[in-house]
Amino acid sequence: KPPPRRRPLVFLTTMVEVTMTKLRNRTATAAAFALLLFGGGGGGPTHLIGMAHGFPLSQQRTSASIPSSLTTTSPPHLSRLGNGSYARLGPILSSAVSVRGGGGGDGGHRRHQRNEIRDDESNILGAAVAVGAVTAAMGYAYGQILGFCVDGVWTKLPLFLSSRLLAANGIALNPRYFITGTLALGGLLVGIVSSRLKSPAYTVADFVSAFAAVPAEARELPRSRTALLPLLVLSLITSSFGFSVGPEAPMVCAGGLVGTSIARKLYRDDRADSDSVSKAREDEGDGAPSGPPGFESKGEAAFAEHLAYAGAAGALTAFMGIPVAGSIFALELTRSGAGLSSGARDALSPSIAASVAAIAVIRALLSPDAAVGGHFSYGTILGDAASISISGRDMMIAAVGCGVGGALIGTVFHKGVALMKKALWPAPKEEAKAASAAAASGGTKKGGGAWKRTVLTKTLVGLAVGLLSSSFPQTLFWGEGSLQCAVDGQATPFGSTKHGLPSLLTSLARVDPSLPFPDAASAASVGCAKLLSIALACAGKFPGGIIFPLFFAAAPFAHAASLAGLWTTNSGVLPVAVMSLMASTQASVTRTPLATALILTLSASGGTPISVMLPACLVSSYLGVYVSQILSRQSYFSYTK
């Protein structure tokens, strides 16, 4: 038979499809940067993303027939474009969609086609790029504000007070009073702010519980308009006042909230609760939504989950400046074992796209003149990076030993945090009984004293951390800015690091932070003090992450083992052992072995021989997770089953 003749309408439709697909891809790229440059005002950039990603034409080939009603209405989200330059593209795209119209159908077919459109992989990647750009701007702004606050509280303020005291009374500033008072004040502020919130602040534990949950209905995150600002403010106060938990966990949470909110804006059915949609579902025989609350389908809920992971990866990448590692960390964090989460098969690509977009925005636009590469030098341990050489047998002995040792440290840490939480925060039933008894006695109304307990507890925790830090000032902060001091056993003076303190605040230190560790006991005492400081902050429910704090706590133990004679100080084993113990300790708590190894190696300086360090780091990271699961069935996070 002769080949069928190409119908003019089909040929025209194909050409329009190709043209509009190219236009959509270019608009998607522009939308990411539009959100960065013009985001926050009038909702225009968000509408632009809706236009760019709401209706890929290539998906229409999968529909046998498209309802004729679709040809007379605008595509999804075009009605939200409003006036201005964004709206001018609406008629063009609407016409492009209507070309393929024809045939009969009902509302069910229309919703099915819309779900197919929204689940398109290219659509998800385009939205993930936009999420990465937005979270990059957020992470950069947060980092700038945090740096300004830390410098003001711990550098400018003590120098100002010292000069005033000397001028007025001729006395010097007492470092113990200043450090203890500052941390107690920080605890008071965090307690006041958190007690005045209508709902508890969103934390990384909530993120882990939500995305480790089954079924997917439990993955609904709070709205960013109510949860994002309290989260960032509490984290900012906690980190600025010197507590030993870092901003990396709040960045994961904030990015997840932003990603989910953008997914709601683009893909949530705004009429889900309206009578018309309810009636349509009843007519179709559904009677109820097929997906989680607020989304029409499980596919749309999965899309929101992917953008939540993308947001977490983008924010973490922007804050740490390390691409891809943030994506792996977010996906490993929500699994109780050494592996990626159940949603990683579909969420990995969007999270990596967001991470790459975030690092591109940071490096190319926001910090174009900043040096690229890591800055933690392991060669300074021996005086020369070229001297780091190790045999295969020594490498495996160090990796296995540090893997088991890190698991022990991590298990002691998370069990200690659990015990402290029970002591500081009574169980809900016990607290309810105490409140009822107080109300019956006429002392306070039921629940009226809860905020007082919150403020008092956090203030006392701040006081305890302050007393500890006044004796060990090198344990202040979350450790990223001063990690080099711990990596090389204080061969780099604490005062010369990014978060180093003026000498007047370290004069009462039990272990001089400006000199290398003199003996094993001194190194071990610094590690124990840092570990206790982290545990107090976590038990006191101060929002923050433990990635770099645990890195800082583990490094002195490796130096203590070396000073105790387990291996010679000038041996190439010591740098490998330091990185391996840091990796194992952190991975055994957060259950993120691959991301931990990537963070440590990508944050190392250019002179560090990664090919020598990475194999032992990977072995100890995974071994730390496996051994910690043997040592304890419980874990730091609660994983919903």
Image: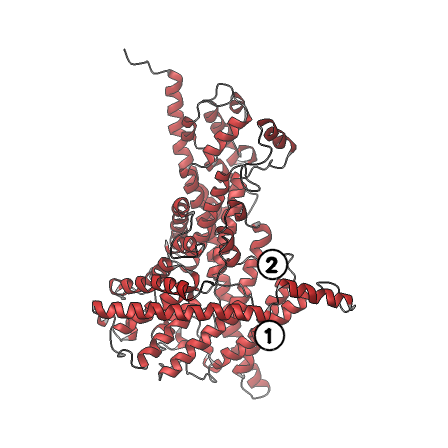
The image shows a total of numbered marks equal to 2
Name the amino acid, label 1.
Leu
Please give the residue where the numbered disc 2 appears in the rendered image: 200
Q: Is residue 553 above or below residue 127?
A: below
Q: Residue furthest top?
A: 1
Q: Is residue 202 visible?
A: yes
Crowding around mark 1 (Cα neighbors within 10 Å: few <14, some 14 to 19, many 20+) is some
Q: Position of residue 548 (x, y in %)?
A: 42, 66
Q: Residue at x 52, y 30 (%)?
A: 111
How much space separates mark 2 and mark 1, taking CA atoms? 20 Å
Q: Residue furthest left?
A: 391
Considering only order in the chain, which callout, 1 or 2, is on the residue closer to the N terminus?
A: 2
Q: Is residue 197 above or below residue 509?
A: above
Say if mark 2 contacts mark 1, CB within 8 Å.
Answer: no
Please give the residue where the numbered disc 1 appears in the rendered image: 460
Left or right side of 131 for 484: left
Label 1 secondary element: helix
Crowding around mark 2 (Cα neighbors within 10 Å: few <14, some 14 to 19, many 20+) is few
Q: Residue at x 78, y 69 (%)?
A: 441
